[in-house]
Image (cartoon, rainbow, N blue to C red):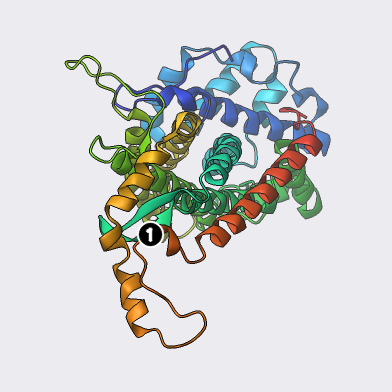
Amino acid sequence: MGETDGVTDLLVPGDHRADGVLDDAAVLAAMLRVEETWLAALVVHDVAPPAAALPAGGLGRLVGDGDLAVLAREADDSGNPVVALVALLRARLEDAGEPDAARWLHRGLTSQDVVDTALVLGAREGVRRVRLDLATQVARLAQVVAAHRDTLAAGRTLTQHAVPTTVGLRGAGWLTGLLDADDDLAALEADGWPVQVGGAGGTLAALVAQAGPERARAVVATLAEQLGLRPVAPWHGRRRPLTRVGDALTTTTDAWGHLAADVLALGRPEVGELAEGAGGGSSTMPGKANPVRSVLLHRAALAAPAHLATLHLAAAGQVEERADGAWHAEWPALRALVRGAVTAGGHATDLLAGLVVHADVATARAHEAAEVLTAEQRSMAALAGPAPRAVTADADPASYLGLAGDLVDAVLVRAATHQAAHQAAHQTRPSPTPEVP
């Protein structure tokens, strides 16, 4: 297949950051990979004759850039893109003098097998990119948190002054959110991404009829192995593999949303405790520096839950062996979630790379609000008895920080462990599985 630009969207700033992840070209490439890997597995296990084996270049050599638009239009006739794709491939294999490959292509599969497995491959790539960004973000944010472990700041609840806190502890909250999100994403990879192969009704009857049960299992296992996926029972009507991805990615955008909301609130000119390193411009106000990275992160955090809700509604709407519309509703929702998270990951990395902490401003504001911030401290002092560690009234907010430092240290230890594990994983990671067996 030739080079094709990914989907970009004028109304989704930053969408280009997700090029190659579940855009039309990537989905088509993934479906081709599933089809050619399946055909190769049929040949390897003597289900299809040796003459059905594809030459170098696989199926990609048969498909050009102009085919995307045609396949998209023809998907309207059958409700999915696979029917038109298989017809196109068979015709071109015949034209190329490969009748056995044309005859055995797609045999034993169903459209949902190809679409679902292609979506899993796309989601896997998206999660891989997000996790790379998260590793960078954790390292950078840990530096910020450590540097401002004891920097005094005014704590706020419901937008109003509450008790004293530190910039480090506030940042530790953001850092914990990133670490929790990466734990969820790591679990997806640790458990293995599932292949989808069930045939027309989830029984693999066509493959078993042709090859017998043992070879049928072997073909599925080979497909999964060559795609780097986990062989599992067909999940046509059980959609947890996709809702689980959506849950983890939405947890991630939640964490970024928390970070972005704090930067937006604390970066207001009248507050001035935080700032983006470089702001975006205005079309009418020269010199205006808008916190664009935070704005776009906030957008991602607001949009993701609706897409996730669609995935769960579709999972709840499954019926019999293939859902009538619920399956189809998943595709754009999953695409938006995965691409949105990849895009947001880049924005979050940029934001943290340039994040500016105005420590002097944060500390000065805490002292300015000392009377309010120490109100709880004074009330506790009034209750204190003669115990050696009795609380005393003190107008200095820095004397009422509780376990702030200890809490920060605990998160920094967790971040260091995360960084070490990430570095070890990348040093020992095996070479990628070849796309075609």
Q: Residues within 10 Å of mark 1 (few under 14, many from 20)?
A: many
Asked if residue 119 is positioned above or below residue 175 in the image, the reply reads above
Q: Residue furthest bottom?
A: 386
Q: Measured from the top left, where is residue 117 in percent x and y?
A: 59, 41
**Left or right placement of residue 336 versus residue 111 in this view:** left
The residue under label 1 is which amino acid type?
A: Pro
Nearest the viewer among 112 and 151 is 151
Residue drawn at 58 percent across, 22 percent down: 89
Q: Measured from the top left, where is residue 312 in percent x and y?
A: 40, 56
**Left or right placement of residue 33 versus residue 8 in this view:** right
Residue drawn at 32 percent across, 42 percent down: 266
Residue drawn at 36 percent across, 78 percent down: 381
Nearest the viewer among 330 and 8 is 8
Asked if residue 394 is positioned above or below residue 152 in the image, the reply reads below
Q: Point out the image quarter for the C terminus.
A: top right
Q: Measured from the top left, where is residue 289 in percent x and y?
A: 29, 23
Asked if residue 238 is positioned above or below residue 421 in the image, the reply reads below
Q: Which corner quadrant of the image does residue 391 belong to?
A: bottom left
Find numbered disc 1 in the image and state the secondary structure of the residue it sits on. Answer: helix
Q: Measured from the top left, where is residue 281 in percent x and y?
A: 28, 18
In this view of the protein, can residue 194 be seen by the observer?
Answer: no
Nearest the viewer among 264 and 303 is 264
Tag count: 1
Nearest the viewer among 50 and 261 is 261
Q: Point out the image quarter for the N terminus.
A: top right
Residue drawn at 60 percent across, 27 percent down: 32
In this view of the protein, can residue 224 be seen by the observer?
Answer: yes
To which residue does mark 1 refer?
Answer: 397
Q: Residue furthest left?
A: 284
